Amino acid sequence: MKLSVLDQTPTSNGQTSAQTFQNTIELAKLVDELGYNRIWYSEHHGATNLASASPEIMIAHIASTTKNIRVGSGGIMLMHYSPLKMAEVFKTLTTLYPNRIDFGVGRAPGGDRFSTLALHEGRQPNVLNQYDKLVETMMFMTDTMPEDHVYSRTLAAPLDAPLPEVWLLGSSGSSAAQAGRFGIGYSFAQFISGQLETSMLEAYHENFTPSEFMPAPKINVGYFVMAAETTEEAEYHAASLDLNLLFLDKGMPFQIFSPEEALNYSYTEMDKMAIEHNRKRFLVGSAKDVANTLREHDEKYGIAEAVLGTISHSHEARLQSYRLLAKELL
């Protein structure tokens, strides 16, 4: 099984954004050395707990500081941007770092309604044409815009750039078949919905049509993960994520809580039920147990690649989780 990373650039209580980005660089260098396949950066706007609002800038910097790992977006929220601009950004990246860049696209806003309104300069975004925008972006990348298209005489620079891998991100399964029709990869966010099903992966494979971006189908699955030497240690660090997700669901601002803060928090019975429900979204335990669960998912669903997102208050605990799982699975 291939292992990859989703880095949402978490910012812990008392930590500056500059420290967060230094942690991001350290993590990227570590997983590159450990043999992870790819690392993706998310796009979040108006968040106090996540520092990455510009994955394209993160990609450029991280690709320059690593050697082998693929670097990409997980994902670009295409509803906010023009296809031409995104084609130009990623063609620039693939020219600088050929065969290492992934263009992962999400359909969510990546922020609250206030951030979305500001990104669209006070206008309501058109959320109905996102698949059309993805198609146009890919046509700009391949210089295949139809002659009768309004953009037929528009070129996306730089010319003759290598193509990135293109991925469509989804959390409900409804986009799986569409990713297959486009001939691009499909990344299912188990960490959002917790509802991985065989049927959605089958829909992707059944509809897959080879393309210039991807000659054969590729699927990966994203998980929240906290692994440690022992289950007790993993549960201790995972308490932070329990409280983080609870605050996120309530729409309350926060930075990444320490395990002590989380364990001493006064939870209502409804809070405890919400935490139990959210636990479907991530894997917590000893590295051996987490690795065995991933192997079971691979056997059951045919997952060739797991994308691991680890959020903890302790940066060292985060690094150690990735080290331990690499030792078990790579």
Image (cartoon, rainbow, N blue to C red):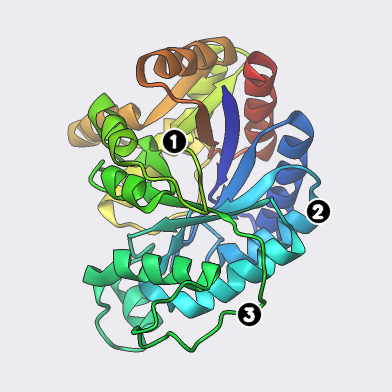
Element marked by disc 3: loop
- 319 vs 80, left or right, is right
Mark 3 or 2, which is nearer the eye? 3
Amino acid beneath label 1: Ile
Instruction: Identify the residue at the far front of this view.
Output: 147
Q: Residue at x 38, y 66 (%)?
A: 135
Q: Residue at x 44, y 45 (%)?
A: 210
Residue 219 disc label: 1
Amino acid beneath label 2: Thr
Mark 3 → mark 1, Cα distance in angstroms: 29 Å
Spot occupied by residue 185 in the image (x, y as percentages of width and height): 45, 45
- Front residue of 259/104: it is 104
According to the picture, the residue beneath numbered tag 2 turns out to be: 65
Spot occupied by residue 173 in the image (x, y as percentages of width and height): 26, 41
Badge 3 local density, few (<14 within 10 Å), some, or many (20+)? Answer: some
- Front residue of 306/267: it is 306
* Residue 59 appearing in the image: yes
According to the picture, the residue beneath numbered tag 3 turns out to be: 157
- 39 vs 245, left or right, is right
Element marked by disc 2: helix
Mark 3 → mark 2, Cα distance in angstroms: 24 Å
Badge 1 local density, few (<14 within 10 Å), some, or many (20+)? Answer: many
* Residue 13 appearing in the image: no
